[in-house]
Amino acid sequence: MVWWKEVHGRRARAVMQRDSTCVVEVPAQESRKGVAGVRTRVAVLLVAAAIGAVWSCSAAAAVKQITWWAGAWNQDVARAIVEEFNRTHSDIRVQVEFFPWEGMFEKYLVSLVTGNAPDVMNVAVDWNVPFASTGRLLALDEYIARDLDEKDFLPNTWIKATFEGKRFGVPYRTETAALLYDKAAFRAAGLDPNRGPATWQELATYARRLTSAGRYGYGYPGKEPNNVTMNLITLMWCSGGDFVSKDLTRATVSEPKALRAAEFLSQLYFDGVVPSSTLENTGDDVRRLMANNRVAMTLTGSYDIDPIKAANPRAELGSALVPEWETRASLLAGWNVVITKQSKRPDAAWEFVKFFVMPENMARYTMTFPTRYSAAGFPRFQDPLLRPFLEQTRYARPLPNIPQLQQLRQIMYEEFQQVLLRRKSARDAMESAEVRMNEVLAR
């Protein structure tokens, strides 16, 4: 950062350097023959300019600069929160940068291990432990105990912020998936628009009836690891299986009850009741297809409701619990806010985190549900369309807290793609995934 003072066309310069030190540079005065009085006056003014520049530099040095990385959604609200914080905290200035979902995990992880991370980051809950295991996140226990009412937070939301007995994040958003469907498509297919399918087998039947020219009965993303494995793991849990053993030492994706999840989802694709573009579709793509009446049902979070309504004000949406198989289940997901160890201003970073997780800020920023009881009473959370999402949290469970979680999900994703490409059977793919996952777990 540089400040200049103009004096008779000459400038004294104060430079704020990256290490927050300040250097003042005053250029030498060339003599002007026969004008000694001017030389003296200019010299005095240059000294004054230098003093003024130092003053500016010192004042700027006192302002602690904080960088916050957030997802590339709800940007207007994020900017408003930053503006309010900066206005009420004269000694701290926060700058926010936005990143898209696709590639975010890799971007954040690389920034941590290479020493280029910001002060504050919003992270998906399943990333918190892997990031903490790198040793690059700051433990927040003392800050939390001093400044937050822990009893105001949903108890299970702290699980995914905890690693080796310490808390490395503060939860601000919690969510789980439920079934979102097109009531008009149900009505046209002769189905009850006020009731979603009760079982996964019934969902397959509904999907066939809802599939017609230009519309698919069901949709799921086939491109992103997290969204693909959300569908796979949800169905594994519903069918009585799991992707890892209870002691977290071995993969179990090829065991019969887990295997039928991959078989079921791939069969929907082969039967033509999910989009032919599934392998290229992200979660955003599936949402757009639904907004355009091209997909009649999808398993997703409540965060997709408002964007669908915005894209298609005439959309008539319904919501329902996740269908049962042997049981009903879903992934408990969400987002935490963390401070990196690379931050040179952790106290200032915490001041922003504390402001960010205030009930009113949490309530307006989250696109699903807040983690604080005191934020849940805001009017926006009383929409009847949200009730199944809230009820589904009774059946939701968090993914296990293991540092290798993202690697395991990547392997499951890669192998399931081989199934959709018809290069492997579901059994062969899950057996291959199991071998690869066990190698990761053994490290």
Image: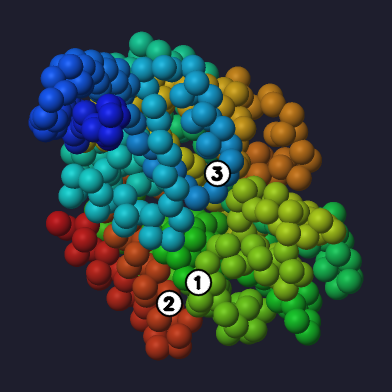
CA gap, disc 2 to disc 1? 7 Å
Q: Secondary structure at mark 3?
A: helix
| Residue in view at x 32 percent, y 75 percent | 431
Residue 230 visible at all: yes
Label 1: few (<14), some (14–19) or many (≥20) C-alpha neighbours in 10 Å: many
CA gap, disc 3 to disc 2? 32 Å
The image position of residue 351, as x and y in percent, is 38, 20
Q: Nearer the viewer, residue 227 or 44?
A: 44
The image position of residue 63, as x and y in percent, is 32, 21
Of badges 3 and 1, nearer the viewer stands: 3
Q: Which of the marked residues, 3 or 2, is nearer the chain's N terminus?
A: 3
Residue 167 visible at all: no
CA gap, disc 3 to disc 1? 26 Å
Can you say whether 245 is above or below 341 in the image?
below
Q: Which residue is mark 3?
A: 75
Q: Tell me whether the residue at label 2 lies in contact with that at label 1, contact meaning CB atoms closer than 8 angstroms.
A: yes
Q: Which residue is mark 2?
A: 417
Q: Secondary structure at mark 1?
A: loop
Farthest residue to the front: give it: 34
Farthest residue to the bottom: give it: 423
| Quadrant of the frame with the C terminus | bottom left
In the rendered structure, the answer to whether residue 55 lies left or right of residue 266 reads: left
Residue type at mark 3: give it.
Gln
Q: Which residue is mark 1?
A: 222
Residue type at mark 2: give it.
Gln
Q: Nearer the viewer, residue 371 or 367?
A: 367
Residue type at mark 1: give it.
Gly
Q: Which of the marked residues, 3 or 1, is nearer the chain's N terminus?
A: 3
Q: Nearer the viewer, residue 303 or 182?
A: 303
